[in-house]
Amino acid sequence: MKIISDLEYAPGMAGDLFLPDGPAPAGGFPAALVIHGGGWTGMDRHAVRGLAEFLAENGFAVFNIDYRLAPQHRWPAGCDDCKAAAQWLFRSEYPVDAQKFFIVGGSSGGHYALMTGLMLPRGTVCGIVSISGIDDVFVDSRFSPGRYQYLLGKTPDEKDLLELNPATYLTPDAPPILCTHWRRDQVVRFAACTAFEQAAADKGVKISVYSYDFDRQFDGHGIWIPGTSPRRLYPYLEAVISTFMKEVISE
């Protein structure tokens, strides 16, 4: 694959573009914006380089980005950056098929993936993938209230949570969504995934949930193969994600 590093998509904000080997199709490569996690406050794009490489290996042009972090930059700065990165990629000179564009993120990056994919104009995004994401902030804030203090600079009230909640932006014409989640996730409770799944189903949105369990304890999100560098998702997660994205493209 070809990697073009440090592409500035907004003043002071950059990402790395991963392009698959070989010539681009006539309409460009299907594409994905990849959004790292870190509780909205930490990490950077290098934490999900393995995810970007996996998607590029499967034929996607991948823009793996940094965004502004809380608490220095409060909501909605980071989410605004994700939307700006998507719009930059649409307008770029690179061989990207804007009709086959996905948003993919993990943990708090899964929240930003859902928010970005649901807040951009309909028809802009063809699919969203949330990997162990903060899919429902009402559920998550009960278990992890501290991260909302960092994100918002205050204790959120119901209005704040409605603004932050992906379900608020669900409509029947929303793009297909895949949520994956370990049922014993130590960082974001599985209940956040099930709450969002119900909200999406109630709106008539096409949603797939892949939940799983394995005999491990205290393994964070339960998504990364231990010892890999860059970190790679477990093979069954990679398979579920690539199958979902390819099926959406083929429909």
Image: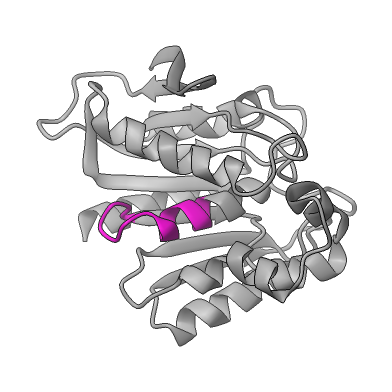
Q: Tell me which corner region of the image, top left, top right, bottom left or bottom right, holds residue 27.
A: top left
Q: Residue at x 55, y 55 (%)?
A: 130
> At which x and y percent is residue 119?
42, 58
Magenta segment: 113-126
Q: Nearer the viewer, residue 143 or 72?
A: 72
Colouring scheme applied when the structure was drawn: one colour
Above-or-below relation of 14 to 215: above
Q: Residue at x 35, y 63 (%)?
A: 175
Give the left or right position of residue 127, taking residue 197 as reference: left
Give the left or right position of residue 171, taking residue 213 as reference: left
Tell me the quadrant of the picture where the N terminus can be found.
Answer: top left
Tell me the quadrant of the picture where the C terminus can be found.
Answer: bottom left
Q: Residue at x 37, y 54 (%)?
A: 120
> At which x and y percent is residue 212?
67, 63
Magenta span contains residue 114: yes
Magenta span contains residue 97: no
Q: Tell me which corner region of the image, top left, top right, bottom left or bottom right, holds residue 71.
A: top right
Residue 146 in sight: yes
Above-or-below relation of 222 to 84: below
